[in-house]
Image (cartoon, helix red, strand yellow):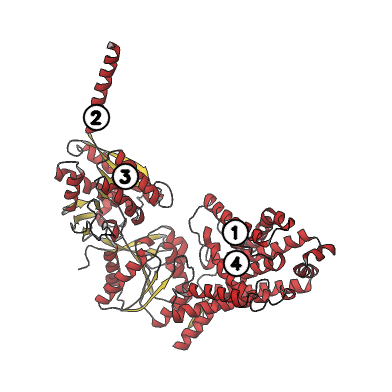
Amino acid sequence: MQAGLFLQTLITGLSIGGIYALMAVGYSLVFSVLNFSNFAHGAVIMLGAYAGLALATRLSLGFGLVLAGSIAAAGIIAVLNERLAYSSLRKRKAPSLYLMISAMGCAVFLENLVYATIGSRFYAFPEFFGRQVINLGSSSISLLDVAAFLFALAAILALHLFISRTRTGIAIRAGVSDMTMCSLMGVDLDRLIAIVFLLAGGFAGVAGVFLGIKYLVYPTMGWVTNKAYIAAVIGGLGSLPGALAGGLILGVVETFVSTYVSSVIRDVFSFTLLILFLVLRPNGLLGQDSEEKV
Amino acid sequence: MKKIVAVLGVLLVLTLAGSAMAADVVKIGHTVSLTGGASMWGQSEARALDMLVKKINEGGGVLGKQIEIVRYDNRNDAVESVNVARRLVSDKVVAVIGPAQSGNSIATAPVLEKAKIPMVVTTATNPYVTIDQKTDKVRPFAFRPCFIDPFQGTVAARFAITDLGAKKGAILYDVGSDYGQWLARYFEEAFIDKGGEIVAKEAFRTDELDYRAQLGKMKDLAPDVIFIPTSQKEAAMAAKQARDLGIKATLLGTDNWGSPDLIELGGSAIDGGYFVNLTDLADPDIQDFVAEYKAEFGEEPVLPNPVMAQDALIMIVDAIKRAESTDGTKMAEALSTTKDLTVTSGVVTIDPSNHNPLDKPAVIQQVDVPGKTFKFVKKYVSVE
């Protein structure tokens, strides 16, 4: 009986952690290149969810097309966000604090834009996967959670391969080490940064659709990304394997705290963890040196 | 000079005539959400009230005067509700109907109390609408025709035990909401009192999305029912997550579930769940009202607000008749001794010690997702 509860807690924790990791990747990608925390990422996730919702309910598309459409929409929004709100700051070599403030402004702006145009009501995705449950002994998990978890792992692995194996990936890694040098070597920085935001936005689209299906779609849903941010810090901001590890660790630890200690102090615990990491190990678990970022 | 005197004379006559005409009407204020998230109910409430006012006026009005409704939109906002209350005071209304929400009602009450104008709220169920939380004394000018949360929690517990045959109950509630916290407590007390056992009482924080850790704990304890006193959003998410964990317990909720989008948000997971509500379209007592409303407006009323607003007006009219006056203090005294008054939803008697109705009925509804409706299950008049 106790073993059953332990296994169920672990499974639930991993499934929550998978979503955290998916969102943390977006933070880490942008941080690795531009060295600031892009707090507008949550708003892009929210817009991705609305885009997916529109495709699913207005055009009655299937899950695959909804996901693809949401990835495309959120990717474009992320690139536009960078062009409109960050690029001029970046070109004037503004301190990263300014970029972060601009990002916060974008988050609030986008959220209120949705309030003003779409409204504050809640929406739910159609039930793509039905309510199918997989049983492992006395523990259960929904098919959706398994699919989301596997997809998150696959997407993060694919991104890792892209960055370590392709020409563009090499350029991104070069940009991470030294942006100025990289540009002197003939790399088009604007294009490079647009690609980084496109990738981060794509991940936001995936996260938005999974969050929307799992929970609900509404204007402030992006705030759940503060957990993803904690995950990124634990793993080491700027590190992709770190984002994955941080997300899974946070998801599992939180669920165990909720189950075995108290669900009410769960967030106290998460934020204490964030502060401890920032004070004692600001580079996180896997983000020791800048070479190892991304 | 003569001209001026003549003009003044005409003005004087007009003013006197005007005030004489004004004296022929009884102005009753109505503070209601005509826009915003609760407008669906507010619009329907306004229609039902106008329908009843017309009927009363055709029957001779009250104290030989016609009733006039002075209506303002409070946009389901506490600050705007206070502004509306001030405007109603300066409009010299004799009584106020509304607001519908506990928070807006608690904000409105002190303004009207200062002006000695009685208010009868429609669907605000929090105990502190009629009781001042600071002094713990009854607010002399605040009344309601709807049940309050302790009763609602007790009805839910009793239904779970006697009708669902539940022995083991679990509670999932929002620790950041007064509504949820108090209802969780009332349900727990009543459930234990009726011989049941609460195997788990788990809380989450407002705005949290994932309750699987809490529900996972409940799963091993195999409750027969899970009581979820939240709004439709949390109920929908909790239902989905409970079913994902393979929990088969019956889900039980409160009147905040009663929003039409519960069915869309919860999907198949919420199907078959039960919740307590103030009224139901199939309630035998309100069939005349529903038929009349449909005939007038060509659609069904959005319950429960239209029914509760009519109850409020009937209580006010009855109080004016018994007090034989539209003086606020006299009306408030009469309202507090309302007894066996036939209203749209049934019969109401006000408890003078807390200005809440005694034995106010509650209905149990069941969520029918394929039919996209809430089915009437039964009606409780008392829990004794």
Return the residue nearer the eye: A169 or B4: B4
Number of residues whose C-alpha sits closer than 10 Å to that of mark 1, classed few (under 14), some (14–19) or many (20 or more): some
Coordinates of residue B266 in the picture (x, y in percent)? 45, 65
Coordinates of residue A28 in the picture (x, y in percent)? 66, 69
Number of residues whose C-alpha sits closer than 10 Å to that of mark 4, classed few (under 14), some (14–19) or many (20 or more): many
Identify the subunit bearing mark 2: B
Residue B383 in which image quadrant: bottom left
Q: Which residue is mark 2?
A: B19
CA distance separating discs 4 and 2: 66 Å
CA distance separating discs 3 and 4: 46 Å
Task: Please name which of the two marks, 3 or 4, marks the residue nearer to the observer.
Answer: 3
Kind of residue at disc 2: Ser
Same chain? Circles 4 and 2:
no
Identify the subunit bearing mark 1: A
Task: Please name which of the two marks, 1 or 4, marks the residue nearer to the observer.
Answer: 1
Q: Which residue is mark 1?
A: A104
